[in-house]
Image (spheres, coloured by chain):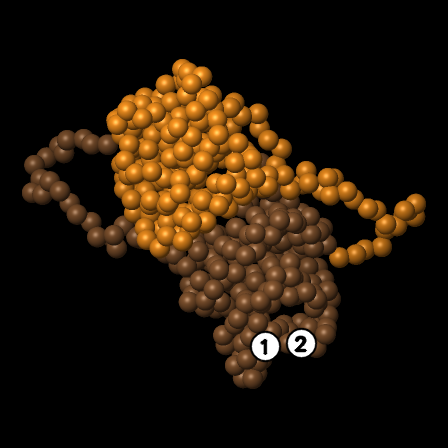
Amino acid sequence: MRLEPPEKVSEEKLTFDVREIEPLLQAPPMDLKPWPEAMVTLKDGRILHIREAKLEEAPILVEYMKRIMEVDHDFYDIVGARVNAEILGWYRKRIKDPFTLVGTIDGELAGFANGRMKNEDIAISLHTMTFVRGGRLGWVMYYAKTYHALEILGANEWWSTFESYNGWRMAGLEMAQPSYPWPEYQHELGGARIYYVTKKYWDKSVKNFLRQMIGTDLNFNVTDEVRKANENFRVPEQMTV
Amino acid sequence: MRLEPPEKVSEEKLTFDVREIEPLLQAPPMDLKPWPGAMVTLKDGRTLYIREAKVEEAPMMMEYMKKVMETDHDFYDIVGARVYAEICGWYRKRLKDPYTLVGLIDGLWAGFANGRLMNEDINISLHTVALLRGGRIGAIMYYAKAYYAFEMLGNKEWWATYESYNGWMRWGLGMAQPSYPWPEYQHELGGARVYYVTKKYWDKVVKAYIRDMAGTDLNFNVPDSVRKANEVMRVPEEVLV
C-alpha cells in the first residue's frame, strides 16, 4: 500500500535491518524466575530429575517429536505435532515467555512438560508427555509445571485443555477442573475449552491431590550426583507411547 | 480426586464410552458457508484453482510440510511445524471451525492458506504459504482467504500475526495493519501481537490493495474442465521455499 508523503523527504528509500523488525515479532520477555530443578524418587525407586531444557537441546527434542507425530493412536500425532511446533517456537523465539521442563532418569529423557506465561496472572498449560512407562511420570511432570506456574512464577490461574481422552481424564476430570464459558473463552490450542485451576483451588485441593497421586513431593535439594547424571540427556531408543 | 457420594448410589462404577467424552474436546462446529471454489489466471497464463482441501488430503499435505520444516532459513521451520500441527488439528478435529484452502495448478499443489473462526465476528488468520515460485501465488492465496472471511463468512475482523520478516513486510506493513494493545491481546500463534483488519478497512482499502498485489481478481465461474483438472491433488516433488 502506498501513499505520497505529504512533505519533502531527504531519503525516499529507507532500509531496515531485520534486527530493527525483530522486536515487533519477538515478545519482550518477562523476567521469569527459573525453575530451580528438582528430583523425585518414583514408586519403583528410580530418581527422576526435572530441569529446564536447554535451548541447544531443542533440536534433539524436535527430532524425537517427529517420531511421536507418526504414532497413530490416542491423539499422539496431534500432540506430537503441537509439541514439535511449541519447541520450535521456543527455539525461534516465536512464543511468549515459555517454560520447557524435561524429566530425565539417569540421563534418559522420560518426561516433558511445557507452558507459557500469558501475563503475570495467567499461565497457559501446553503439553505434558511421558516417554517411559510406569512411575506415574505424567502426574509428576504435570505437578512440576503447575507448581512452577503457581508457586514459583506467581501466576493466579492455570489454563489447560486436552486433546486426548486420557489427558482429559487425568487432569480435567481427576482434578475436577472447572471450565470457562465457551466460546467466549478459548484455549490457544485450537480454540478448545479452557479448563482452569486458580491459585486458591490449587492451595486448597489440587496440590495435595497431585502430591498424593505421586506418593511423594518434589525435592529441590538435588544432589550433585543426580545433577551430573542428568546434565545431558539421550532420547529413548524405542517408542513406548 | 475422590469424595464420598453424599447419597446411596445404585452403581458405584460408571463407564463412559469415549464418544461421550468427545463432545467435551471437539468444538461443535458453526455452520460455515463453504468456499465455492475460484480460479485465477496467473500472469504466465496458467490457471490457479483455489478450493477447499479435502480431509483425506491432510496426510499428503502433512508429509509435504515435514519437508518444509527441515528448511533452516526465513522461519520456514517454525512455519512448517505450525502448519503441520494445524492440518493435523483439522484432521483430528482439534481445531475450532477451521478452513483450509489449497491453490492448485493442473492438480499440482501450489499454494496454501488457512485460518479459523473464533466466533461469528473474528476470523483468525493462521498461515499462507506459496509452494511454487512466481505468479504471486502467496498474494492470491492471502486474498482468497481474506475474501472468504469478509465477503462470504461475514466476519467483522481479521486477526493476523507474523513469524517472518517477509510476512510482516508484505502483510503487516504492506496493508498498514494496526495492532491491538499487547500483551492484553495475544494471537494464539505463540502469544504474539495481533495485527488486524476490520471489515470497514477491508472495504475501503485492503481489498483493492491485495487485489492489486494478486494482479487479478477471483473468478467464481469455474468451468468443469478446471474443476476436473484439480480434483485430485498431488504435491510438488521438491520444496522450493
Horizontal side of B53 relative to B45 (left or right) equals right
Q: Is residue B238 visible?
A: yes
Q: Residue at x 73, y 70 (%)?
A: A215
Q: Earlier in the sequence, mark 1 or mark 2?
A: 2
Residue B214 numbered tag: none
Horizontal side of B90 relative to B240 (left or right) equals right
Q: In the image, what residue type sits under mark 1?
A: Asp
Horizontal side of B199 relative to A45 (left or right) equals left
Q: Chain of mark 2?
A: A
State which quadrant residue A133 falls in: bottom right
Q: Tag 1: Cα neighbours inside 10 Å, few (<14), some, or many (≥20)? A: many
- In the rendered image, the quadrant that contains the N terminus of chain A is top left
- Where in the figure is residue B19, as x and y percent of width and height? 73, 39
Q: Is residue A146 visible?
A: no
Which chain has been coloured orange in this picture? B
Q: Nearer the viewer, residue B238 or A19?
A: B238
Q: Chain of mark 1?
A: A
Q: Which residue is mark 2?
A: A46
- Where in the figure is residue B10, as x and y percent of width and height? 92, 45
State which quadrant residue B105 falls in: top left
Real-space CA distance between mark 1 and mark 2, rounded to the nearest whole angstrom: 9 Å
Q: Which residue is mark 1?
A: A106
